[in-house]
Amino acid sequence: MIGLSIAITGEGQLFQIWPSHAGKKFPAATIYDRSAKVTAFRQAEVNLGKEGHLDAAGQASAKRTAWNLANPPAVDVTLSFKGPVQNGTVKVKCKNGVEKVFQVRLQALDDKSIQQAFAQVDAAITNCKIRGARVC
């Protein structure tokens, strides 16, 4: 699926498991981590650059990070994760605003269990891109 772009937000164990699953399920996708933790680290980099605590290369990187924070790229799908693997939720939001929330219950951490647990989420992601979010 060329050109698929996915932003991920949230917290919890499902949030930590999904990116490695996505690498197998959507290998050509670009995944943007927009979680609170990563955003805070990026903001800290920007602040260090503004305060002059970085060398020239670091300050240039901090300026790019500041620009990226202020101008996040548009994505096809945003996933929001919440809760533990035993009973978590994943909200899939397509770029046209269509949303769907899934309960995810992961019983084991093997590939087959992970694929089964995220099957509906994966289908909704695919629908966002292929069908223009009409069936999400």
Image: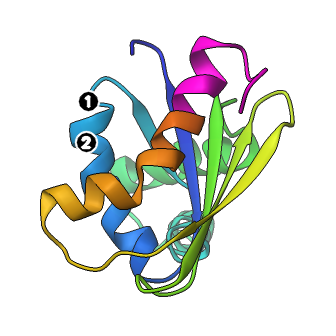
Q: Position of residue 108 (x, y in %)?
A: 21, 78
Q: What number of labels is visible?
A: 2
Q: Quadrant of residue 102?
A: bottom right
Q: Name the side, left or right, on which 47 lies relative to 101.
A: left
Q: Does the segment drawn in magenta span residue 93?
A: no
Residue identifier under label 1 = 27
State the residue in front, 104 or 11: 104
Q: Is residue 55 visible?
A: no
Q: Position of residue 30 (x, y in %)?
A: 42, 32
Q: Name the mark on residue 76.
A: none
What is the secondary structure assignment of the residue under circle 1? Answer: loop
Disc 2 + disc 1, Cβ < 8 Å: yes
Q: Does the segment drawn in magenta span residue 133?
A: yes
Disc 2/disc 1 C-alpha distance (Å): 5 Å
Q: Residue at x 87, y 36 (%)?
A: 97
Given the image, on which type of amino acid does mark 2 rest? Gly
What is the secondary structure assignment of the residue under circle 2? Answer: helix
Residue identifier under label 2 = 23
Instruction: Bin the neighbour count of mark 1 within 10 Å (Cα to Cα): few under 14, some 14-19, many 20 and up.
Output: some
Instruction: Please tell me whether residue 130 is drawn above or below residue 102 in the rendered image.
Output: above
State the residue in front, 9 or 126: 126
Q: Residue at x 45, y 70 (%)?
A: 15
Instruction: Please tell me whether residue 41 is drawn above or below residue 125 in the rendered image.
Output: below
Q: Residue at x 26, y 29 (%)?
A: 27
Q: Is residue 17 visible?
A: yes
In which quadrant of the rendered image does the N terminus lie? top left
Q: Name the side, left or right, on which 103 lies relative to 114.
A: right
Stretch in magenta:
125-136
In which quadrant of the rendered image does the C terminus lie? top right
Given the image, on which type of amino acid does mark 1 rest? Pro
Q: Position of residue 101 (x, y in %)?
A: 71, 59
